[in-house]
Image: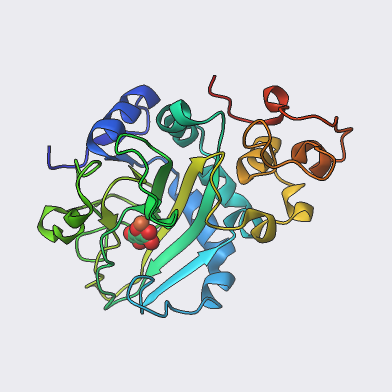
Amino acid sequence: MTVIPRFAASAAAEDIAQALQTVGCVIIENLAPVELVDQILAEMDPYIDATPYGSEDFTGLTTKRTGALLARSRASVDLVAHPLILDITQKILGPYADTFQLHLTQIINIGPGGQAQGLHRDQWCFNMFPFPPEMDVEVSTIWALDDFTEENGATRVIPNSLTDPPTAIKDNHRTVGATMPKGSVVIYTGRTIHGGGANNSDRIRRGLNVDYILGWLRQEENQYLSCPPEIARTLPAHVQKLAGYSLGAYALGYQDDIRDPFAVLNGHEAGSSFGGLDTAIPIVNK
Ligand SMILES: O=C(O)CCC(=O)C(=O)O
Ligand SMILES: [Fe+2]
């Protein structure tokens, strides 16, 4: 198959996850209301204005990358912790860890004249570690904050590239544009070869990149600094946990005397022992 499988917002997580597992990419059309997207853009506008352009080709010389969505945009919480996306992510990452967590939140605005980003795998951020070819460690999403078109730099993905050799990043001719209306989302995994498209239009292409990783990996965006405790405390409990204020595995992520970070964050009495996974984390796979 050389197209990106497309689903309606009403589709079952199971069907979407199966397509994602097989082809490595899927689009869910119109999953977010346009009004919600506009609210996120309004809340993020001052931060986007203050963001510098990328300093080299990969980050994009006409591209702005603006993060810390959980701290800066209350409306973004509905996308970052979208139940359907979390459900799909759970199905993809579930076999490899007891938990998964937020990896990064980033509005990616590709300005007019922006060149296509070099094709890559997102999981290469883990120091290029050669994970087993069939293993998933990351699920990536890009929400279209504008209509994504071939002309304005829709994300480009290579369907069926999950286990291709790294040299497939040269296969520009195999890429397909994730064209989709505003409020839709393209999902791919850490193994899928993809990159931002060239923006040949005269308007900015705005997208929101939210990725998720296994609970035992390091987060790309440092959530404890981007969304510090005083702000995290005001978020819903499951979002606090998703952001990383929870144990990532039996003995990962505790504070001082082996206290549960979720309990500490919220001023609850926190026991002192390893492995509070049953109650401490949002998303238990087993
Ligand atoms: O902006 C996009 O469409 C994709 C960006 C991307 O893949 C990345 O920065 O890792
Ligand atoms: Fe990427």
Which corner quadrant of the image does residue 4 belong to? top left
Task: Inspect this view and state whether residue 37 appears.
Answer: yes
Q: Is residue 75 above or below residue 16?
A: below
| Closer to the camera in the image, 178 or 96 | 96
Q: In the image, what residue occupies the spot 26% across and 78% down?
A: 113
Residue 222: x and y, percent?
61, 57
Coloration mode? rainbow
Give the total number of marks visible in the rendering: 0
| Closer to the camera in the image, 14 or 244 | 244
Residue 273: x and y, percent?
80, 29
- Which quadrant, please, contains the C terminus? top right
- Which quadrant, please, contains the N terminus? top left
| Closer to the camera in the image, 259 or 90 | 259
Q: In the image, what residue occupies the spot 59% across and 60% down?
A: 68
Task: Inspect this view and state whether residue 155 appears.
Answer: no
| Left or right of residue 8, residue 262 in this image | right
Residue 211: x and y, percent?
46, 48
Residue 215: x and y, percent?
56, 39
Which quarter of the rendered image does ligand 1 occupy? bottom left
Q: In the image, what residue occupies the spot 42% across and 27% down?
A: 91
